[in-house]
Amino acid sequence: MTPRQRMAFHMERNKRRTIESAELAEIGVLYIGTYRYLRPMPSLSPHDHGPATEICYLEKGSQQYSVGGRDYNINGGEVFITHPHEPHSTGQSNQARGCLYWLQLDAGCPRLLGLSPEDAELVGECIRSLNARTFKVSDETGRLLIAAFNDLASGSPLRFIGARCKLVLFIFGIVTDMAAYKSDDDISVEIKRCLDEIEEGIRGEQTTSELAASLNYSESYFKQKFKREVGIPPREYILRRKIELSKPSLLIAGRTITETALEFGFSSSQHYSRVFRDITGMSPSEFIRMSRE
C-alpha cells in the first residue's frame, strides 16, 4: 500500500484540501491542509486542536482570527499561531477570500518529523518557543510549507521524505523570522503615510493613481510596493476599510443602506451591497438583522 493510499486526502468544494494519516501522526503531523477560497465562507466557530500547535500561513488575502478575547488581522505573507488546547475562531468575521495553508504539530512527539529523539526534542522546543501570535515570514519560509503539502499530496514515498525535510526547515524558518520580526519596520514610511491618507479620505473616492501620485510613484510601482508591504492590493484594502468602517453607520436607527453607501463613496446601494457581500459573505440587511438579534 502506497503512502497515498494510506493517507486520507480530502477535497471539498471551493478548493479546500486536507491530509491526515496514521503514518503522519506517528511523526507528530496531525493535520496539514490548504484552502483557496474564491468567495467568503462561513465563520469558524470556537475550537481547539488538543495537543497540537497550529501554524497558519496566509499566502494571499486577509483574515481575522479571535483568540483569548482579542482579534488579530493577518494579511498575505503572515502566520497565525495557536497553542495546544487554545480555543480560537474567526470571531464575527467570515473566512475571507484568499489562500491559506495550515499545519498542526504535536511538539512532544518523540519521533517528530521522523527525527532522532534528540533532534525531535530540539525541534519540539523550537515549536514551543513560538511566543508571537502573528508575524510576517519570508517568502522562502512560506514556500517550504507549500512545497511540503504538495509533496505529501503527490503520494510519492520519496517526496514523503522530502516533505519531512521541508517541514523541519519550515519550523527553523518560522523561528528565525519571528526573532527578526519588527512590525514597525515592515511597512515603509511612504506606505504608512499612504495608509493615513486612505483613512482620512475613506468617505470619498480614492484611486490608486492619485495615491501613487501623492508619493511620486508610478502607479505600477505603487501597486507592487503596497501589496508587498501590506499583503493585499491597494484597491482591495480601500474597499475592506470602507466596509469595516461603514458597519456602525448601518446600525444607526432610521438610517438607510443607501445613505450609508453614499456616505462612504459608493455610487449606489447596489454597488455597496455587492462589495459588502463579497467581503463579509452577507448582505448589509443580513448584517443589520444579525447584529440586532
Image (cartoon, helix red, strand yellow):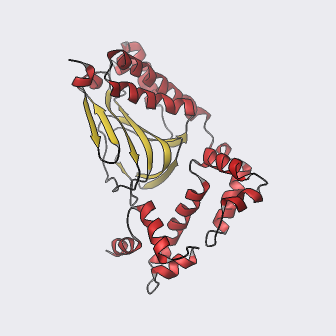
The residue at 50%/65% (across/down) is: 244
The residue at 69%/54% (across/down) is: 192
Give the camera-side residue of 5 and 247.
5
Residue 225 percent coordinates (x, y): 67, 46
Look at the picture and state if 173 lies above or below 80.
Answer: above
Location of residue 77 by image quarter:
top right
Decide if residue 108 is in sight here. no
Look at the picture and state if 175 lies above or below 162.
Answer: below
Look at the picture and state if 258 lies above or below 212.
Answer: below
From the viewer's perspective, tell me whether residue 256 is left or right of residue 191: left
Question: In the rendered image, which quarter contains the N terminus?
Answer: top left
Give the camera-side residue of 277 and 80.
277
Residue 278 percent coordinates (x, y): 44, 61
Q: How many marks?
A: 0
The residue at 32%/39% (across/down) is: 17
Decide if residue 291 is in sight here. yes
From the viewer's perspective, tell me whether residue 194 is left or right of residue 176: right
Residue 127 percent coordinates (x, y): 44, 29
Give the camera-side residue of 289 and 283.
283
The residue at 41%/38% (across/down) is: 101
From the viewer's perspective, tell me whether residue 27 is left or right of residue 222: left
Residue most extreme to the bottom: 254
Give the camera-side residue of 276 and 53.
276
Residue 201 percent coordinates (x, y): 66, 69
Question: In the rendered image, which quarter contains the C terminus?
Answer: bottom left
